[in-house]
Amino acid sequence: MTEITFKTTPEVTLVDYHGSDASIVAAARVSVAGGEEAQYLEHLNVAKTKEYRGLINYLMTHRHGTPFEHNSITFRVAAPIFVFREWHRHRVPWSYNEESGRYKQLDPVFHIPGPARPLINVGTSARPQMVPGSFEQWEKLRAEMEEHYILAYRSYERSLAAGITKEVAREVLPVGIFSTMYATANLRGILHFLSLRIHDPEAKFVSYPQYEIQQAAQQVENIVKKLFPIAYSCYIDNGRVAP
Ligand SMILES: Cc1cc2nc3c(=O)[nH]c(=O)nc-3n(C[C@H](O)[C@H](O)[C@H](O)COP(=O)(O)OP(=O)(O)OC[C@H]3O[C@@H](n4cnc5c(N)ncnc54)[C@H](O)[C@@H]3O)c2cc1C
């Protein structure tokens, strides 16, 4: 029998990227410099950091968004299907390729909330205020989930063994099963995604995303912070409003 794995956290890794803070500046300068400046793709020069910051901050605060579109980041995401359902609501400018439940047997990897995951909402649905459950509540939930996931996956395997095609046999699998995808977007779209999927009480427009997509978004944010440090810091200073 296939061994079943339980995970508490989605995983986001960097696959590929192009562009930098310098390419945001280059794209913005085309408007005044014309074709010659369009060739300019100098890598970020520390001596020019202040100059870049001033322009990028201007673009961010005045919501001149298009210079933030001439770049891209590709992420590999492994997350439960209920997180994918939330993520895939972000249509612009994301491109997605996801593993197929028609063409391959889905791996027996399921999500179980870790003990630190708050389990009780003492706020409202619009403004959730999540607090921890008791250890007994978490332990009961964990046991329920494990039991159900194992039952569901064994049923899936029995249908496959009986010759049922994968696309039909998968119907018994719950939304806690992990899937994987490539997700590619430009910085403007990624910042919009982060503004909705990270809870920050200091943000100009405070969002209340679900814990698990926020775990994934936090990993996206860490990658963005490394690749576009100036644009990222301007975004934070601007109250997490995407340009
Ligand atoms: C905390 C939270 C709770 C949520 N709860 C629910 C819920 O209960 N039910 C539910 O269905 N969804 C829910 N959502 C999903 C939400 O409604 C959006 O679908 C999701 O956040 C993607 O946002 P978006 O449309 O701005 O992003 P994108 O699809 O990436 O679009 C980016 C921007 O492009 C423009 N745009 C895109 N498509 C169009 C269009 N067709 N017409 C005009 N302009 C367009 C808009 O300016 C939009 O902001 C929730 C999201 C969050 C963050």
Image (cartoon, rainbow, N blue to C red):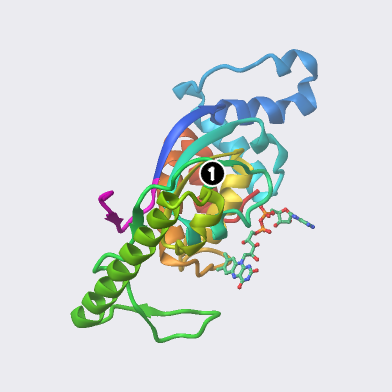
Of residues 81 and 100, the one drawn nearer to the viewer in this rendering: 100
Give the magenta-colored segment's residue range: 1-11
The quarter of the displayed image where residue 134 is located: bottom left
Residue 34: x and y in percent read: 80, 19
Q: Write the residue at 68% across / 35% down.
A: 67
Find out if the beta carbon at label 1 lies less than 8 Å from the nearest ligand 1 atom.
no
Q: Is residue 238 visible?
A: no
* Element on which disc 1 rests: loop
Residue 177: x and y in percent read: 41, 57
Of residues 219 and 160, the one drawn nearer to the viewer in this rendering: 160
Amino acid under disc 1: Ser
Does residue 50 belong to the magenta stretch? no
Q: Write the residue at 25% across / 81% down.
A: 137
User: Which residue, as the protein is rendered here, is positioned at the far front?
Assistant: 162
Examine the rendered structure and indicate whether residue 217 appears above or below residue 150.
above
Q: Is residue 182 left or right of residue 140?
A: right
Q: Is residue 168 visible?
A: yes
Of residues 26 and 133, the one drawn nearer to the viewer in this rendering: 133
Of residues 121 and 59, the one drawn nearer to the viewer in this rendering: 121
Q: Write the residue at 78% across / 26% down.
A: 32
What residue is pinned by disc 1?
100
| Secondary structure predominantly adopted by residues drawn in magenta | loop
How packed is label 1: few (under 14 Cα within 10 Å), some, or many (20 or more)? Answer: some
Examine the rendered structure and indicate whether residue 87 appears above or below residue 126.
above
Ligand 1 picture quarter? bottom right
Q: Write the residue at 70% across / 43% down.
A: 65
